[in-house]
Amino acid sequence: MSKFYLLIIIIAMISGCSNSPRYRTGPAKPSSTNKGKPPALKTSSNVKNRKVMTGVSSFYAEDFHGKLTANGEVYDMYGLTAAHKTLPLNTIVRVTNLDNNKSLILRINDRGPYVKGRILDCSYGAAKKLEFVNQGTAKVKIEVIEWGDGKYMKHRD
């Protein structure tokens, strides 16, 4: 019986010396389920992976109100959404107007802008809150908060 307890103790000691995967160092390896997608930014420890861009933003309003956006939802010019050329659809971003330091959290639900030299097209509602409707454009900083899934919404008829 004492050899049995000794064997249990030795096995427990040996298994206690192995590395636990939750304490590994270095960046996490990407899983096969999110190939090609940036990692989700949900914790402050991921700040170094945050994407930040600066450039000129414009806004779009009446001409597109009620029409479908690139992700398949109906555009609401009074909503807090934006169009970007390359960010995955449904990405959440903080947009800061660099002229007055006002910022707002928006969701990317459309593609654009299609005017050279611009990096973002805000909804009218977002441009109003960022206070650049009268100017038409503003220099902005865009910070990715959470990467989108890039999914298209399907509507029933």
Image (cartoon, grey):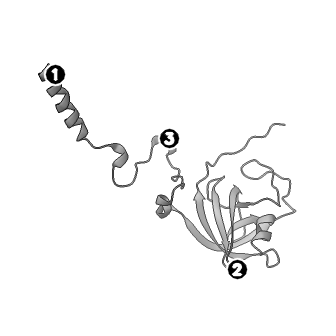
Is 59 placed left or right of 45 in the picture?
Answer: right
- In the rendered view, tell whether residue 112 sits above or below residue 99: above
Q: Residue at x 61, y 73 (%)?
A: 54
Three-letter amino acid code at the position of disc 2: Asn
**Residue under circle 2?**
100
Q: Residue furthest left?
A: 3
Q: Residue 116's spot in the image, x, y percent?
A: 69, 72
Q: Nearer the viewer, residue 144 or 68?
A: 144
Q: Say which of 152 and 105 sits in front.
A: 105
Q: CA distance from mark 2 to mark 1?
A: 74 Å
Residue 15, percent across and down?
24, 36
State left or right for residue 86 relative to residue 63: left
Disc 2 vs disc 3: Cβ atoms closer than 8 Å? no
Above/below status of 6 relative to 106 = above
Residue at which label 1 appears: 4
Mark 2 or 1, closer to the camera: 1
Query: What is the quadrant of the C terminus in the image?
Result: top right
Sequence-wise, the earlier of marks 2 and 3 is 3
